[in-house]
Amino acid sequence: MRRARSRRVQPVPEFDAALVAARPLTPYVRELTFERVDGEIVTFDAGQWVNIVIPSDQTDLKRSYSIASAPNDSSRFALAVTHVNGGPGSTFLHQLQEGEKVRVQGPQGLFTRRHLKFPGPTLFVATGTGLTPLRSMLLDELHKRETRPLWVLLGARTEADLLYRDELESLAGQHRNVQFIPTLSQANSAWHGHRGYVQVHVSKLWTELSQDARPHAFICGLQRMVSAVRDLLRKEMNVPREQVHSERYD
């Protein structure tokens, strides 16, 4: 009997990285830019994530964070980390100072655009730091001079919670194929934009994108939102599975 060949599992890359820049994105989210200490290029597909090893008195902890920056053949990459009260990983990273080093494992993950079966417009749907892998994809597509529609539907509680708002508004102004659609669940009277959860607006936006082509949806955020949007597209609107891509972070 011929024995099937066993697949060799590739080890996950590990390297040390130093914090070279940090800035607040919202009152609770900090963007951290790291650089490999050895100067090697950080090779990844837009949408992938890394593990950061968090030092501990007992067993070191690992926390996963999607890469917020686009692949650019450099030794740097950025993360956006929400501070969770009592969370050892986010507390450590929010206190990390420039020049300090961390151990990184990865990049890895399958939530990417590498294996799309057909090109088409894209509706990015995110809440909170679920935006980070989608931002990486958006910047990567623009770098590749993509001209098909790239629409970003971002949900937050208040204006202060909108990640990368200035950047997304600027990109929408610079590129005709980019739209930025923020929606707030706890908007005040001064807000004149969209209101409510993201799933309230998905159907209309998807219908608009579907007029001339078969779009893709990339969805990232908490499980409740991801499940609601997936169910809306797959079960209520009968969108084929190959057009709906999602990842949750809880």
Image (spheres, helix red, strand yellow):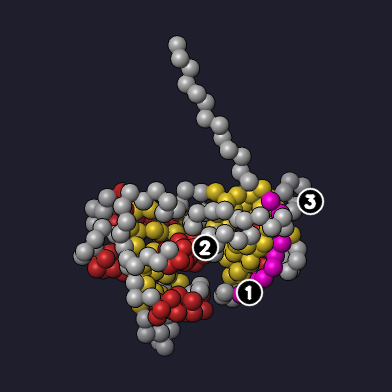
Helix, strand or loop status at disc 1? strand
What is the x, y in percent for residue 96?
72, 66
What is the x, y in percent for residue 6?
52, 26
Magenta span: 15-24
Are the residues flagged by discs 1 and 2 in contact, CB closer than 8 Å? no
In primary-sequence order, the first of circles 1 and 2 is 1
**Amino acid beneath label 1:** Arg
Helix, strand or loop status at disc 3? loop
Image-quadrant location for residue 87: bottom right
Q: Which mark is residue 57?
A: 3
In primary-sequence order, the first of circles 1 and 3 is 1
Q: Which residue is mark 2?
A: 70
Depth check: 91 or 142 in front?
Answer: 142
Q: Is residue 36 visible?
A: yes
Question: Foreground mark, 2 or 3?
Answer: 2
**99 with respect to 78 (left or right):** right
Depth check: 86 or 178 in front?
Answer: 178
In primary-sequence order, the first of circles 2 and 3 is 3
What is the x, y in percent for residue 164?
50, 74
